[in-house]
Image (tube, rainbow, N blue to C red):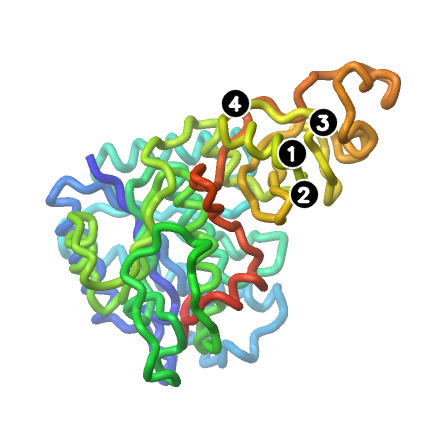
Amino acid sequence: MTRVVVKVGTSSLIDDKRGTLQLSSLCKICETLVDLVAEGVQIVLVSSGAVGAGCQRLGIDRKDVTRLSHKQALAAIGQGSIMRQYDDVFSALGQPSAQVLLTLDNIASRSQYKNASSTFEELLQMKVIPVVNENDTVATTELRFGDNDSLSAQVAIMIGADWLFLLTDVDALYTANPNSDPSAKPIPVVEDLNTLSVSTDGCGSKYGTGGMATKLTAAHLASAAGCNTAICSSSHPERIMCMVQGDRSFGTCIMAISERPPKPTKKWILSVSPKGSITVDNGAAKAVMDRKSLFAAGIVSINGAFSTQDAVKILDLHENEIARGLVNYNSSDMKQILGKCSKEYEDTIGFHGPEEIIYRYNIVRTSQGNGKIVVALSLNDLTKLATEPDSSC
């Protein structure tokens, strides 16, 4: 049975000029999702718009909202309004729905991750459409740029989705901003994110907080977990089924680097925010790509401060991310034993722990494994590679 996660951004739900909810867009999206359920597709909807809806209710300009506590209060006001609209429309269509509020911290906790995964499984088996949003009201960190793009990718990984659809107010990823560059061309398929050659000069919408950069980050995460990603227009949600069936005549499809979904532990590793990075030599990089463990002898440098069992990025000598994994040593000890053989550990750090820095079963590859690296770019790097005019969070 096909599983699909659909993410809808703020700019697809809130009119940028009037600041009002676009009911016609919301209804069209809901109708499409109900049709997909009728075709046997299991659906999870990730919806932004809580802060934007809160601004609408109070007549506040989103750009004037800068304090975290203000955003959290507006999210509390707007979330109920958004969910009520979804519940009304789904109920009118005879489709049960459920509200699921998550934070990235929830997903980073192994026990909470398992509980959330079990909840999604039960809801999908009951043919319920979960409506997911970031739980902004209780977030302990700033409402980051494009969090719901990352959240949608992590939900897709959690449920083992076949497709992640990022619905936005543009119809595809372009080589340049189509609003200002007449030579801009849509990119129908991306087999390798590292081959992209595009530019950026777009910005977020009035009520949204994200853009194409965060969508490419989300696509990278989903791709590593065996999930295809599509970036397409929210004005034509009916195209979702066509794209699932192989139609590539609209939108942009970013293909998964692996057809085999990772095991539960590796899915969770992809969802955890990396605490640092390990740069390895060519021999160690090849071993990682060959699904082998990582040893200290192949480590060139360590970046960041992390503890035992934290997730880290594994980088090649060109600083390309090739994998992620859970470390057996903290960063302080690791800096002392990098480049050394395992028999030297005890004399160096005073104890002899595991020979492996990262066990092979705690490593998940984020590259294609054919010499072409799928780069897990930072947000700043990605904004140099992508464009989206009036984009959404």
Does residue 98 appear in this view? no
Q: CA distance from mark 3 to mark 2?
A: 16 Å
N-term-proximal mark, 1 vs 3: 3
Q: Residues within 10 Å of mark 3 (few under 14, many from 20)?
A: many
Query: Which residue sits at x=47%, y=73%?
Result: 200
Residue 344 percent location from the top left of the image: 82, 18
Q: Which residue is disc 2 drawn over?
A: 276
Counting other residues with Cα less than 10 Å from the Cα at mark 1, is it few (<14), some (14-19), or many (20 or more)?
many
Q: Which secondary structure, mark 4?
A: helix
Viewer can see residue 360 = yes
The reply to whether dot 1 and dot 3 touch (C-beta < 8 Å) is no
Which is closer to the viewer, label 2 or label 1? 2
Q: CA distance from mark 1 to mark 3?
A: 17 Å
Locate residue 35, reporting x and y percent: 13, 51
> Which badge, 2 or 4, is on the more N-terminal residue?
2
Q: Which SS class for mark 2? A: strand
**For the residues marked 4 and 3, what is the alpha-carbon distance in whole angstroms?**
17 Å
> Is 155 situated above or below 388?
above
The image's mark for residue 310 is 1
Give the mark, 4 or 1, whose residue is nearer the N terminus. 1
**Which residue lies under the disc numbered 3?**
296
Mark-to-mark CA distance, 2 and 1: 9 Å
Q: Considering only order in the chain, which callout, 3 or 4, is on the residue closer to the N terminus? A: 3
**Mark 4 residue type:** Tyr
Q: State which tag comes first along the sequence, 2 or 1.
A: 2
Task: Assess disc 4: are there few (<14), some (14-19) or many (≥20) residues with their C-alpha within 10 Å of its C-alpha.
Answer: some
Could you tell me which residue is drawn at 26 percent across and 63 percent down? Answer: 251
| Number of residues whose C-alpha sits closer than 10 Å to that of mark 2, classed few (under 14), some (14–19) or many (20 or more) | some
Report the side of 333 relative to 6 (left or right): right
* Mark count: 4
> Residue at the location (51% across, 47% down)?
103
Residue tagged 4: 361
